[in-house]
Amino acid sequence: MYLARVYNSRAATVDAMNRLARETSPYLLQHADNPVDWYPWGDEAFERARGEDRPILLSVGYAACHWCHVMEHESFEDDATAQVMNERFVNVKVDREERPDVDAVYMEAVVALTGSGGWPMTVFLTPDGEPFFGGTYFPPAPRHGLPGFPQLLVAISDAYRERRGDVARQAAALVEAIRRSTEQAPSREPLTESLLTGAARGLRAQLDPVNGGFGPAPKFPNAPALEFLLRRGEVEPVTLTLDAMAAGGMYDLVGGGFHRYSVDEGWLVPHFEKMLYDNALLAPAYLHAWVVTGTDRYRQVAEETLDYMLRELRLEHGGFASAQDADTDGVEGLTYTWAEEEGAPAELLQPFEHGRSIIRGELDAETRARLFEIRERRPKPLRDDKAVAAWNGLAVAALAEAGRRLERPDYVDAARAGAEFLLGPLSDAEGRLHRTFRAGEAKGTGYLEDYADVAKRPLRAARGDRRAALAGGSAAARAPRRRAVRRRGARGLLPDAVARRAARRAAEGSRRPSDPLGKLDAGVRAPAPGTHLRRRRARAARRLGVPAGPRRGRARAVRVRLAALRARSPLLAAEGAAIVGPPDSEVARAALAPFDPNAVVAFGPSHDVPLLAGKDLVDGRPAVFVCERFACRAPVTDAARLAGAASSP
């Protein structure tokens, strides 16, 4: 079965009918012995499609995806279905985590066609890469209003051969829909307080007043939205959501860490995959809520989540794996759920399926340790041990800040090792980022999201750790402008010739929502050679402050406005603190203690950073210079005098 495969057995299958055995992606390797004649994304597949005038069947997913496993087992492992695929299509398999560009464009087509998206994603393309039909999961036989996959294959193939005009018109309409959805005109609207107030009002209107979170089921943990509201001082909706998510189910009460999302409104029943990026974003959200409210439970969840990352996702080279699977031995949630006789408190068990239950409620430390010991004897879900640059940037940031705030040297050491990994195996000789690293091989040039998250996160959180800051500063310097990034090899959307033909204008306007704003955030926090550059970046922030379109929804709107909030203060007011001396000195710790995410902090002494220019120890003592509007006050050497005047995470 697919879950029993060993990823590193590629050498034994190099001569397999499909070509995925030569890949490094665990998701592609999961499909390496399918009877389907798979190609990885690339010119070879499209050249064959053009030469034989066949449509392309594009299948996109990721290694930890439950329904991807289901469709593989039902269809891609089935000889009869594979025969139809091989006779009628050129079949292309893509790991969305390796190629977010390909995933993003064709997901736009699927959403335009069906109104929703997800994984596995199944898209039918012309030999030039233009989508003309698509969906997500298709069952092996008709059910729940979905056609059976074998019947769909025949129908699509017949339509391509016999109704080419209809196919061409549908493809043109979908490419136009992609173009429209991805265009983003520069905004002339200034970044005012009313823009942020409107964003907060919109979030409150969508808040579930009983269970927290935003909107109906399925519910995804929206860390950027929670951080935005917390920064606005709107604590109640944040704590409602954090409490509900941490009650058990969505949150792993026994081993720590969050599953990807909840299928119900109450955060009880999750899809059980655990993603690095979710946990690296949620840990700081709980940490910041602890700083603001003093609630020890939030600190506990933050620590348990980071402990989970170190225990289950950390790799031997210092980086972090992408995810853990939803399934164990082909059963979703088997590792994380409990039967009545397995030792979990009966009063805390909530029914799941297959006679198993989810733990929800309060676990004392002794019971938690006992259950964890029992669970450690079970088989574990497979781990996608591919390291993604962007997500490792998020992990380094979370660990660096938590290490400082919680006085956890192990977190600081892990952040430092992660920064070394970003500067080493995940960078080339000239300092350009790769996208992924696995099995000793770096693959792909970095995307904008990689530069954004590797740049801004360590810069924002390192606070005195030179190597973590260097990782962020290097990435920020490598991604100052979109055109320069492209010239140096960092990919925007769809760099391949085939994909450019599919959506040439979409490639100019489509990015992950946070990418340009994250890059801007990194740029304004990186050392700048003068205030004129910061002001120029302020103008860039204004142009990016465009309200999100209605279909892009809550996540993009929040990130745009969150970035506006971040950018406005350090850019236009140049607020911050110059700290001269050790970051663990009393005065430095006092400056860093409050929650003020808009401040820029620089550690010195240094002659290379403008904020630190001319600043040194005061009579040999560490000092903090609080700065505002490009002017700094007299240095403070007494921690008691700061009283929260300087800050930041």
Image: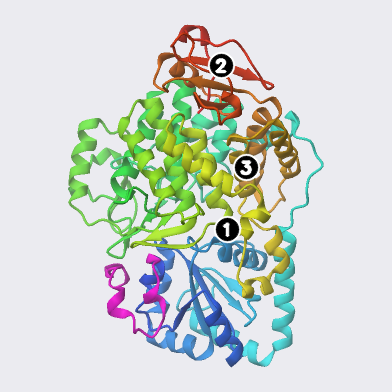
Residue topped by disc 3: 559
Residue 648 placement, left or right of 631: left
User: Tag 3: residue type?
Assistant: Arg
User: Tag 2: residue type?
Assistant: Phe
Residue topped by disc 1: 490
Q: Quadrant of the N terminus?
A: bottom left
> Marks 2/3: CA distance?
31 Å
Residue 221, image x, y percentages: 50, 44
Q: Counting other residues with Cα less than 10 Å from the Cα at mark 2, is it few (<14), some (14-19), or many (20 or more)? A: many
Q: Does the magenta stretch include residue 5?
A: yes
Which label lies toward us, 2 or 3? 2
Q: In this view, does 209 lie above or below 333?
A: above
For the point 29% across and 39% down, which residue is it? Answer: 348
Residue topped by disc 2: 625
Secondary structure under tag 3 reads helix
Q: Could you say which is closer to the camera, residue 115 or residue 593?
A: 593
Residue 218, image x, y percentages: 51, 51
> Marks 1/2: CA distance?
37 Å
Name which of mark 1 and mark 2 comes first in the sequence. Answer: 1
Q: Could you say which is closer to the camera, residue 280 or residue 569?
A: 569
Name which of mark 2 and mark 3 comes first in the sequence. Answer: 3
Q: Give the range drawn in magenta.
A: 1-26
Q: How many numbered badges does the structure rendering display?
A: 3
Q: Is residue 321 above or below residue 631?
A: below
For the point 47% across and 7% down, which residue is it? Answer: 640
